[in-house]
Amino acid sequence: MVNFRRAPFTLVACLALGAFGAGCGGDDEESSGSNPAPAEEPADSGGGAAESGGKAVKAVKVDMKDTTFVPMDATVAKGGTITWTNSDGFAHTVTKDSGPGADFDSGNVDGGATFKQKFAAAGKIDYLCEIHPGQTGTITVK
């Protein structure tokens, strides 16, 4: 049952606490904080499997985060494009190491910036960050 005398106070308290990310439940509910928000995942990553119904996807996104390419293994359709977004606060590169097709090197991609590369030749491509050589990834072009 709602206590109408407390309703204005409850509404004001909810609005004030909402600015600090606190939830607002009923009078007999208590927020336990046991249900944290789910972690964000890079868009279109598909956990590295960028295929839909047996077809490779034409546009794939890879995040550069915590000195890692996420996903580390991406699949793109022949003629498709991969967009890398740097979510770190420092520069990375996206540099072809081996595989079919034209060589590519993004140069320094600063934090918050992106780099796009189109892939015309099918096969497996290995790439890395020249600034952080342990940051590696593979691209399968189908």
Image (cartoon, rainbow, N blue to C red):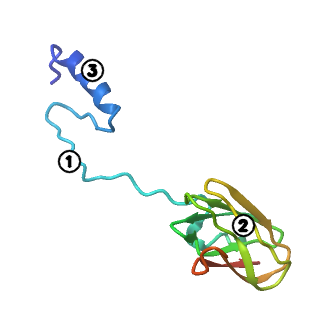
| Neighbourhood count class around disc 1 (C-alpha, 10 Å): few under 14, some 14–19, many 20 upward | few
Amino acid type shown at disc 3? Val
* C-alpha gap between disc 3 and disc 1: 21 Å
**What residue sits 15% from the left and 24% below the top?**
1
When asked about the image quadrant of residue 101, the answer is bottom right
On residue 32, which mark appears?
Answer: 1
Image mark for residue 57: 2
The amino acid beneath tag 2 is Val
Tell me, yes or no, whether the two marked residues, 1 and 2, touch with CB atoms within 8 Å. no
Between discs 1 and 2, the one toward the N terminus = 1
Q: Mark 3 points at which residue?
A: 12
Disc 1, SS? loop
Q: Which residue is drawn at 14% across and 19% down?
A: 3
With 106 as the anchor, is 45 left or right in this view? left
Q: Earlier in the sequence, mark 2 or mark 3?
A: 3
**Number of other residues with Cα within 10 Å of mark 2, as a class: few under 14, some 14 to 19, many 20 or more:** many
Q: Quadrant of residue 39?
A: bottom left
Residue 30: percent from the left, percent from the top?
A: 17, 40
Disc 1 to disc 2, how far (Cα)?
A: 41 Å
Tell me if 89 is positioned left or right of 19 in this view.
Answer: right
Percent x, y of residue 113: 67, 55
Q: What residue occupies the far top of the structure in this picture?
A: 5
| Residue toward you, 66 or 29 | 66
